[in-house]
Image: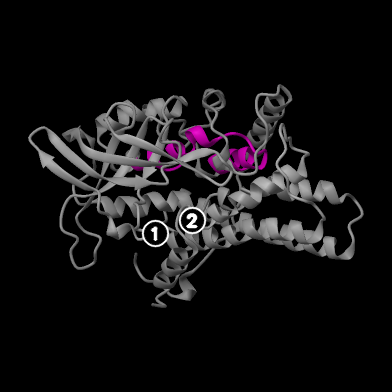
Amino acid sequence: MPQASANDLHFPPPRLPDEVTALRAEVRAFLANSLAADAWQPNSDFGAGFAPEFSRQIAAKGWIGMTWPKDYGGHGRSNLERYVVTEELLAAGAPVFAHWIADRQSGPLLLRFGSEAQRQTLLPRIAAGECFFSIGMSEPDSGSDLASVRTLAERTPAGWRLNGAKVWTSNAHLNHFMITLCRTGEAGEDRHGGLSQFLIDLQQDGVTINPIVNMLGTHEFNEVVFDDVEIPEDRLIGQEGDGWRQVTSELAYERSGPERFLSNFHIFRTLIDAIGPEPDARQAEAIGRLTGRLWTLRRMSLSVAAMLEAGESPDVEAAIVKELGNRFEREVVETSRAVYAVQPATSPGGNAADFPALMAEAILRQPSFTLRGGTTEIMRSIIARGLGLR
């Protein structure tokens, strides 16, 4: 990443084009009708709702692969239009996670680095809500140090042989593909060399998928193990040794979107409803502070979306949004517990108005917010390096 100074850091005031007003109204109407039909229950975390049928429904509306070229099943729309759709889906607590990774980062990665055959085969299926992806970056005992990748891909006469393991691979037991970071050569002095990415067919390539049950007792995470897994040559993404550049590009899509501060929006909205129209002074101050931070984060995130639309690479700005957004998500839970007397408790059949059940789920999910997409320490390191502070 090229070094900058604090003076180069910028969040230009974003302006949403007029045409997105009608699009926002269309998305809200669709969600209201869908929710009224009991098609889904709102959730407090975008990673909690895996609903392939819902993904197919919004794909039919043209809301997956929105910015991709029409030749690959996309719709040629702007990043800001996509932002509005994403924002409405998250604010409603819609079950978006089936298509989420494929739409947000795997598809754009293939569009930029994949072969023409990979693009022609996979992108239309993603845009139709029929093909879902996992991320294969993190490894056991490696923490957030991606440069320490040990999963090894060795050349064979027919392609590649993979050995190693990946963890925190959300919904790998349900998804179709995983883009996997492997070591294919020597690391070099900067530790970032010798890495390549491969397209793994999770349903056909003979990998072993071991469940990781979280504190909620649910199974979203997995360990994916490669034991002499053979894949053909055409599964390499881009050029051999280009994995680090691809990964850093991919993570930029992950770190600046509205999911970085709207995961607990449902909690915030329910807190306001629970307090009612006559908050006491402490409650009013807390709601005002959270509202101000939420609005500021939204403006910053929209600014990053506008910069991406303009072809810029706002890596440092994206990392700032991610770090501040994760702090806000934690603060929503902590502030809610401090200003409103609620005893978190799981309850069968909890619904949108069941504040104790929502709080119980949010508290248990809270530790994950600082991990996904890079830990707080990693984000601050990226920001410091980008600003020339280390």
Foreground pick, 202 / 121:
202
- Mark 2 and mark 1 in contact? Answer it, CB < 8 Å: yes
**Residue at 45% in and 59% down:** 314
Residue 27 picture location, percent across and down: 64, 32
Quarter in which the N terminus is drawn: bottom left
Q: Of the residues shown, which amino acid type is indicated by label 2?
A: Leu
Residue 59 picture location, percent across and down: 51, 26
Farthest residue in the bottom direction? Answer: 389
Q: Residues within 10 Å of mark 2 (few under 14, many from 20)?
A: some
Q: Name the residue carrying label 1.
A: 144
Count of numbered marks: 2
**Residue at 83% in and 47% down:** 274
Vertical arrangement, residue 340 with respect to residue 30, above or below: below
Q: Is residue 73 visible?
A: no
Q: Of the residues shown, which amino acid type is indicated by label 1?
A: Ser
**Residue at 27% in and 30% down:** 206
> What is the distance, in whole Å, between disc 2 and disc 1 at their CAs?
8 Å
* Residue 85 falls inside the magenta stretch: yes
Farthest residue in the left direction? Answer: 157
Quarter in which the C terminus is drawn: bottom left
Residue numbers of the magenta segment:
82-109
Residue 224 picture location, percent across and down: 34, 40
Say what secondary structure mark 2 lies in.
loop
* Tag shown at residue 371: 2
Farthest residue in the right direction? Answer: 278
Residue 70 picture location, percent across and down: 41, 29
User: Residue 176 occupies which quadrant of the picture?
Assistant: top left
